[in-house]
Image: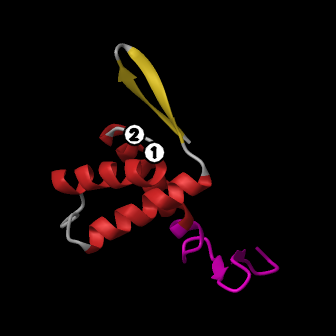
Amino acid sequence: STSAVEVSGEKVKAIWDKRLIEIFCNICIKEILKGNRPGTHFTKDGWLKIMTNFKKETSKAYSQRQLKNMWDALKKEWKAWKKLKGKDTGLGWNPIKRTVDASDDW
């Protein structure tokens, strides 16, 4: 996944790999547990800490917008995954195999 932000008139893409996404998620979870996402959005201080800690752990100075774009993309994927394994589709989740469960008919 990528997100672009203008820097001096040029678009600079944030490149995300599995490791960066995992680090980002862990940082976000810590900020949520600290109360920096009291409702549906992170506080200004929460975003500042996310940006600071992400740079500290990855040496990548992604902007708040780039991080927010990744948050939104991950949230969209999570909602789709949750719907896929939910009652709507008749599918389930096998936590041992870490796969989607489906009946033979499905």
Q: Residue at x 38, y 45 (%)?
A: 67
User: For the view shown, which residue lies furthest in the top direction?
Assistant: 9
Dot 1: what SS? loop
Using the image, tell me which numbered label, if any, was put on residue 62: 2
Q: In the shown orientation, is residue 46 left or right of residue 77?
A: left
Q: Residue at x 60, y 55 (%)?
A: 18
Are discs 2 and 1 less than 8 Å apart at CB? no
Query: What is the quadrant of residue 4 in the picture?
Result: top left
Q: In the shown orientation, is residue 106 left or right of residue 73?
A: right
The residue type indicated by label 1 comes to Ser
Q: Alpha-carbon neighbours of circle 1 within 10 Å: few (<14), some, or many (≥20)?
A: few
Q: Position of residue 2 (x, y in %)?
A: 53, 37
Q: Residue at x 39, y 52 (%)?
A: 56
Q: Position of residue 71 (x, y in %)?
A: 40, 52
Query: What is the quadrant of residue 24 in the picture?
Result: bottom left
Indicate which label's residue lies in the foreground, 2 or 1. 1
Above or below, 27 against 1 in this view is below
Q: Position of residue 55 (x, y in %)?
A: 39, 47
Q: What are the residue bounds of the magenta stretch?
A: 82-106
Q: Quadrant of the N terminus?
A: top right
Is residue 87 located in the magenta-colored stretch of the structure?
yes
Main SS class of the magenta portion in the image: loop
User: For the view shown, which residue lies furthest in the right direction?
Assistant: 104
Q: Residue at x 39, y 39 (%)?
A: 61
Q: Position of residue 105 (x, y in %)?
A: 80, 77
Q: Which residue is mark 1?
A: 59
Q: Is residue 17 visible?
A: yes
The residue type indicated by label 2 comes to Tyr
